[in-house]
Amino acid sequence: MYDFAYQKPSSVGDAAKALGGDAEAKALAGGMTLIPVLKQRLNKPSVVVDLAKLGLSGITVSGNTVTIGAMTTHATVANSAEVKAKFPALAGLAAHIGDEAVRHRGTIGGSLANNDPSADYPAAVLATGATVKTNKRSIAADDFFAGMFTTALEQDEIITAVEFPIPQKAGYEKFPNPASRYAIVGVFVAQTANGVRVAVTGAGQDGVFRQKDMEQALSANFSADAIANIKQPQNGLNGDIHASAEYRAHLIGVIARRAVAKAA
Amino acid sequence: MPFEGIGASVRRKEDVRFLSGHGNYTDDINRPGQVHAFIKRADRPHARINGINTAAAAKAPGVLAVFTGADMAKEEIGGLPCGWQIHSKDGSPMAEPPHPVIAVGKVRHVGDPVAVVIAETRQAAKDAAELLEIDYTDLPAVSTLKQAVAPGAPLVHDDVPGNVCYDWHIGDKALVDAAFAKAAKVVKLDLTNNRLIPNAMEPRAAVGEWDTSSGDYTLYTTSQNPHVIRLLMGAFVLHIPENKLRVVAPDVGGGFGSKIYHYAEEAIVTWASAKVRRPIKWTAERNESFMSDAHGRDHVSTAEMALDADGNFLALRVSTLANMGAYLSTFAPCVPTYLYATLLAGVYQTPVIYAEVKAMFTNTVPVDAYRGAGRPEASYLLERLVDAIAHDTGMDRVALRRKNFIPADAFPYQTPVALQYDSGNYTATLDAALQAADFAGFESRRAAARSRGKLRGIGVSTYLEACGIAPSAVVGSLGARAGLYEVANIRMHPTGSVTVFTGTHSHGQGHETTLAQLVVDQLGVPLDQVEVVHGDTAKIPFGMGTYGSRSLAVGGTAMVKAMDKVIAKGKKIAAHLLEASVEDIEFKDGKFSVAGTDKQKTLTEISLAAYVPHNYPIEELEPGLDETAFYDPKNFTFPGGCHVCEVEIDMDTGVPSVVNFVAVDDVGRVVNPMIVEGQVQGGVAQGIGQALLENAVYDEAGQLISGSFMDYTMPRADNLPNITVGTEITLCTHNPLGVKGCGEVGAIGSPPAVMNAVIDALKEYGVRHIDMPATPQKLWSIIQAGAPRMAAE
């Protein structure tokens, strides 16, 4: 990696200040993407601002909301008795991100801020209509994701927590890339009082997206059969040596049906 | 004393240090004053180098030196040599273009070394390498065999017309053509053997050191054969006499063939260490491994079998294109010839065989031996062809195999492609495997799977391989530029413990245990008093290293011969001490005794007498008990067996899973059953990897698409079933241990078993053949394309 300055502020305000004054500054959460990128010399930040001392980790369940601090690791979410009881699809998703080592370093805030088009968490956030809390504002999921590796976050904006409304039922299923085990297709379905939302990760050229035909069908009838005949168009989907756009389009249907079938 | 000899599943002695993090690998070695090398590599497949401006890099902080190919050429440093010469059909020697240590004039594959920066730290070397200004003119590239053979294809080497390294053949073409002319049926199959990247867990590394006092060089390197590296690098590349060059291969974390070869980085750090007068370390980053470790396989073949009306094989005709990559790696030319086409008889009594092999240069990483080396390509071709014959003729695939097997009473058996098999019983391994896999009960499992939305198939492979490499005179006559004997030195110590110095090298196989068990067995010394030393040319006699499942069959036999000498000398000492005649001395269970009496001396007492020769036949016998034997094998060994694989394919997604795998192998006598089981399981894991997961993909422009673990699919635990390993033994007839070798059987026998199962699972879709790897997307496409027809039926 290239040389860079390193700061580990102890308040969100100081962290935002460190990031805000410098377009080349990078925030470090769990580092599961940033560290490999630095090692490969694909990024040359002026300063790395470590968010580990901001006190942003922890899980709160109150009423119909699960709130997860931005620096909470995937393992913490996966193993939380409260999340498992109230929102098992989220715990299940976290339990299958990366491998054991990644789950003990990687964080929900880091995953969302990075918005890798193959990451799992964006599907949960978008499908539940969660709210991304930052040091500046609250951002609705529909406004947060802005294309591959791009979000609504400003340079001096730090995710502090994610607020998930607890769905009546939800399920997440993923078809992993056989090599990297990132999602080739991941589908999160959530049934709420306001209807069903379906979010697809891994497949779209612009990152996570909502599958509205499925949402409509499932809102009328929350069963795998209800979406059996919905054809996902290929345009806008990724293709690579593991899965063409055509195959991904097919998989979205299969994986969505499995997500519905396992929803709890 | 617990049973620790031949046949005991004793735990591996080496695992204590490996599992507790105390292995000593090349990258763990740090020499005083050590500096670091970073290799600048070509980022493009084919380009002319117009010039390299090193000035800025050389002035960068911490940099000691920057060297290019031109700097090495000035000192008449040789190119990396090739250890095997093949002659084409017309008698002409293969094209053997220069393989500069650092590119000169042109770069020929992504990863080709262009310059080396030596600096105080690795970081400084990498920083400086970014300041190198390389002026390239890009040239059109060929990456696939199809591109390389196309008329007018770009030339990888300007002086190698048509990119052809050699155009070789074996067998009697006229006899084969005549047999085809009168055949009742001919079955033809086109198939590809996919290109693989070995990916040993430990990346390659090298530390070069030049002693300012003695002028001696030492190279620490990740090698399977340190003496071969010393010979090749000393004699052909750097012109360092062997008495001034020591090569050490300490603990090595997996090789699979990829660490046999002499690589550029070894020569670079050794040569440059004298230039900068500092020890130099280089350790590959994982992305460098992908683009600089020799790759494996990469064949495109057509196979045809001529049959009589009863399904007897009459003649086999094979035509193969083999990818050599951009340069000839150390043993590359022999892999698709003498390690491949000589195996095309397999376990069958096909009377006549003709094979032609055209080896091609491409703008890709050099291709060389990878676990099995040529033999997996042969067994895959044959075992897929046999299933295609069953498919086309409607014959039962197991009955077809049985009908054509070389019978158990036909050994020694001379094949029409040079090899003479000494022993085997293919019906026995087949029967045992079918029973262990419940082959007879398969159809009910197929039906049950279907009700779960899964297509279930079963596949059989009855394979054979040749290993225990190799009789020196035979391989010499076939083009080898090396002997392939092995050597062992058995050093009895005064107190009765033993050190074994072996020319073989362990890089995961467990030699420190298996070879020690031979000493337990023959000399009666407890396992914990036996030390096996390997991997250091300053310690061990000149041996040829480990590959081709040779360590036990060849290296173990050398040990037996050396121990025979220890016993023979010990008998003379015992005869003196026991006041008996040598002819009356017997040696058993570590004791010398006078036949028919209770007079005896232990081996420990004899050892002590040998080193403290107070009461000793000093007039007739030298002191000491330290014996060396070289052993050149009389023949290859021929392990074989039967692998049965069951897969299920998810009809919705095309995802295949291996749900059962049985391997019954004849590896000859088994020294350590636990280690054999582990070796077979590891080989099968790599075979399943080749069949379902792994694929080195170059795009048409010559870029390596699968250049990291993000895209190159290694088999993982959850891709693998529980693998049932069995053995059905016939003894090798020409080595005293009766051993054949087990390191490669798993990777040789398994890919066709897996693919035959996948194709069986899809039989209702009319599938006759699928090329490896059988990825979910490929299988889904078949199911998808077949679905409307299925619905209509």
Image (cartoon, coloured by chain):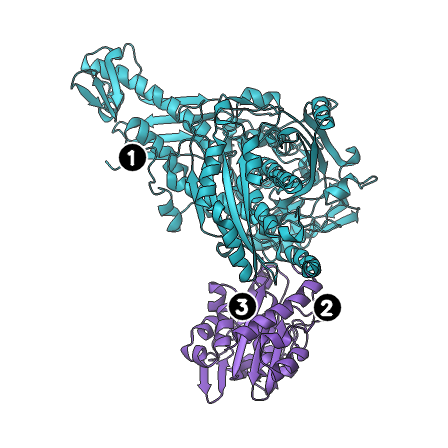
The residue lying toward the viewer, choosing from B408 and A5, is B408
Q: Mark 1 and mark 3 in contact? Answer it, CB < 8 Å.
A: no
**Discs 1, 3: same chain:** no
What kind of residue is marked 2? Gln
Helix, strand or loop at disc 3? loop
What kind of residue is marked 1? Gln
- The residue that disc 1 covers is B529
Measured as percent of width and height from the top left, residue B668 is found at 43, 31
Which chain's colour is purple? A
Q: Is residue B485 left or right of residue B55?
A: left
Tally of numbered discs: 3
The N terminus of chain B is located in which quarter?
top left
Q: Chain of mark 2?
A: A
Q: Mark 3 and mark 2 in contact? Answer it, CB < 8 Å.
A: no
Please tell me which residue is depicted at 54% across the width and 61% down the height of the picture.
B451
**Discs 1, 2: same chain:** no
Q: Nearer the viewer, mark 3 or mark 2?
A: 2
Which chain's colour is cyan? B
Q: Earlier in the sequence, mark 3 or mark 2?
A: 3
Please tell me which residue is depicted at 71% across the width and 28% down the height of the picture.
B180
What kind of residue is marked 3? Gly
Q: CA distance from mark 1 to mark 2?
A: 68 Å
Answer whether residue B547 is visible to the viewer in this image: yes
Please tell me how crowded label 1 is: few (under 14), some (14-19), or many (20+) other residues with Cα within 10 Å: some
Q: Chain of mark 3?
A: A
Q: Chain of mark 1?
A: B
Answer whether residue B347 is visible to the viewer in this image: no
Measured as percent of width and height from the top left, residue B510 is found at 41, 40
